[in-house]
Amino acid sequence: MSDMHNSNIAKLEVRALLALEALLRERSVSKAAQHVGLSQPAMSHMLARLRRTFGDELLVRGRQGFVLTEYGERLLAHVTQLAPQIEALGRADRFSPHESEATFRIACTDHAAIVLLPPLQRAFVTAAPRATLKVLSVHSRRLDMDHLEATRFDLLLGWFQTLPADWHVKKLLEERLVVISGADNKAIGETLDLETFLSLKHVVLSPDERMMQNMADTTLAAHGLRRQVGAFVSNFSATPFIVLNSSLIALIPAGLAARFAQLPRLRVHEPPIAFPPFSVSMAWHPRVHHEPGHRWLRELIAAAAEEARMLLDTFTSRIPNIDAND
């Protein structure tokens, strides 16, 4: 790269660098323009200028729209990390929740939504009455990271087995599995023994979303045991209602059982064998790591998780005495 080329790059101002990041990420002039607050013609001129500056086309037309050149791909890896720091240079490092009209986009599993969203939403509305929380439902084992990138869902809540290496992760609380049943299930006495646990049919997550099923069945298999399946569901939300009106039982996270126990005639039992605990975590994109509003949101989520943890601890200490009469 020539000295003149290096000099041109060094002269790029903050807006041009932010436009570059948006163009490379969105692969669309119109979407990039919308993101940085420019008109589409102005962004087209900006793209032409950036091509001259870098001596590369950066974006070229493919069969389904723009694609990045090889140099554009390499450049994207650098500006993605740089963009949050560039944005921070152009604003005061402060955030006023009460005045904010921002939309915060988070994605979470069914489990995390039920356990964490009630305390989070309550605190969010109180602290930031003019802001909006937008929630996307995701599965732990089928994360569409391209979709999250395109729609700028920058924060994830749940138990995730794999995440991009550059995302930040913070453990929020530890969960464990318990068993729920309907009060009319006469096969279960005061406690749930192993023979009954294996003889009854279970409600489990469907085969393509086997987070808890893998955990439970792997543990059972290690003891030479296997449970019977009576129904598959795609998420946990329907599980207590199936259990209440049938002879089926279900293994679910204790945090969910604490919420579901508010339903009349639902019983909660300790499982007859110990299943390994697992963590509910918060993960966020590096582009929002230094952003003041997102730092505030992460603190709010951590506080909501602490409230959920206290509820969970109180609830699990009472499990042997929780029945349909509570």
Image (cartoon, rainbow, N blue to C red):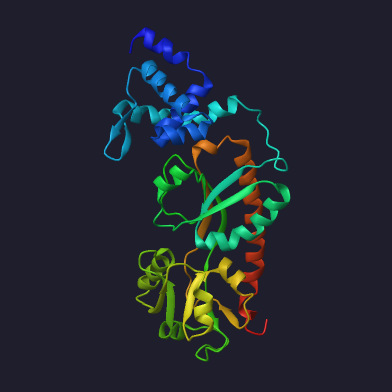
Left or right side of 131 for 138: left
Q: Within the image, what quadrant is residue 226 found in?
A: bottom left
Determine whether 230 is above or below 92 in the image.
below
Q: Quadrant of the C terminus?
A: bottom right
* Callout count: 0
Outermost residue toward the left in this view: 63
Q: Quadrant of the N terminus?
A: top left
Which is nearer the eye, 236 or 177? 236
Most distant residue in the front direction = 41
Q: Residue at x 49, y 41 (%)?
A: 285
Percent of width and height locating residue 113: 56, 60
Which residue is at a point 63% across and 36% down the rendered structure image?
292
Q: Which residue is at the far top?
A: 3
Which of the 4 quarters of the picture holds residue 262? bottom right
Give the side of residue 207 with respect to residue 251, left or right.
Answer: left
- Picture coordinates of residue 211, whole percent (x, y): 42, 63
Query: In the figure, is residue 206 to the left or right of 313?
Result: left
Q: Residue at x 38, y 27 (%)?
A: 75
Q: Which of 147 and 79 is in front in this view?
A: 147
Percent x, y of residue 230: 40, 80
Residue 276 x %, y %:
47, 65
